[in-house]
Image: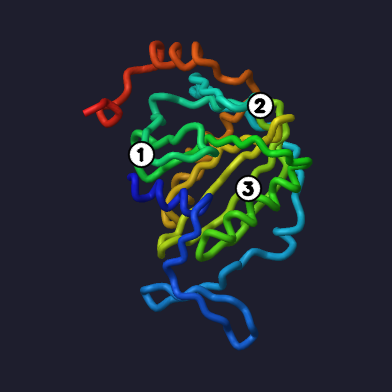
Amino acid sequence: MKKYLFLLLSVFSISIHSQIKALTEEGKEVVLFDNKTWKFINESDEKTLEEIKSNTQLFNKSKDATFLMKSKKMEIGIYFNPKKWKIINNGFSSAFIDYYFNNITDPSLFAIFGSENMPIQTLKNLKELVIAGVQRNADYFRLKESEYRTVNDIKVLHLKYSVNTKGIDFEYVGNYYLTPEGYGAITAYTFGNKFEERKTELENFINGITKTEKSTKSDIVEEIIYSNPPPPMMKNK
């Protein structure tokens, strides 16, 4: 599990390029994989990269998403179902990440709740920032969807994209929210060959995003006391 969280971090923050890259006769960049296959570095449709659709459907958190975790840095939180998802300590540190999550019944489902103090003007600017970061650090990238949504009465940027890093395909979904202090992101992902089967579970998780007060020390203590007992994996050895 830690290995795949590290791969996720390599997409967000660390430049790891283990695959061989080359140019076609037309001058387009491709990545060559160990299994003798190849892909263009960026297969996103130009229109998808430029445009952001507006989805008029109203999205809400799942009824079973009853437990709230708050960001320590800004007014954003995530409601989730503690019987389905657990908070994990993976041994890695990042200024961006507030919490890591892993699905209890399906360990191949991961999620990150992150926030960053950064003066971003619009969600469109945030989209450009996110895409640039992922493209820079992944071997392969394809933006599949970007749209404005209303989730739990707040306007968010919703993104779906595919990446390949270190020869492994991943599929991501995320909701991104701007605050006066910066932005927050709820991103969930799994392996490329499992996404269609498990995308409802991932989308339900990111729809727990909400506007809330910042977390305080007393909030954290209360969460530890009143949350469901952690599974055996979370106990200190």
Among the two numbered marks 3 and 2 on one chain, the one whose residue lies closer to the N terminus:
2
Query: What residue is shown with label 2?
Result: 152
Would you place residue 58 above or below residue 107 in this image? above
Query: What residue is shown with label 3?
Result: 159
- Marks counted in the figure total 3
The CA span between labels 2 and 1 is 32 Å
Image-quadrant location for residue 101: top left
The CA span between labels 3 and 1 is 27 Å
Q: Disc 2 on helix, strand or loop?
A: loop
Q: Nearer the viewer, residue 21 or 51?
A: 21
Query: What residue is shown with label 1?
Result: 91
Quadrant for the N terminus, please.
Answer: top left
- Counting from the top left corner in percent of width and height, residue 184 is at 62, 35
Residue 200 seen in render: no
- Counting from the top left corner in percent of width and height, residue 137 is at 53, 59
Q: Amino acid at mark 1?
A: Gly
Image-quadrant location for residue 227: top left
Among the two numbered marks 3 and 1 on one chain, the one whose residue lies closer to the N terminus:
1
The CA span between labels 3 and 2 is 17 Å
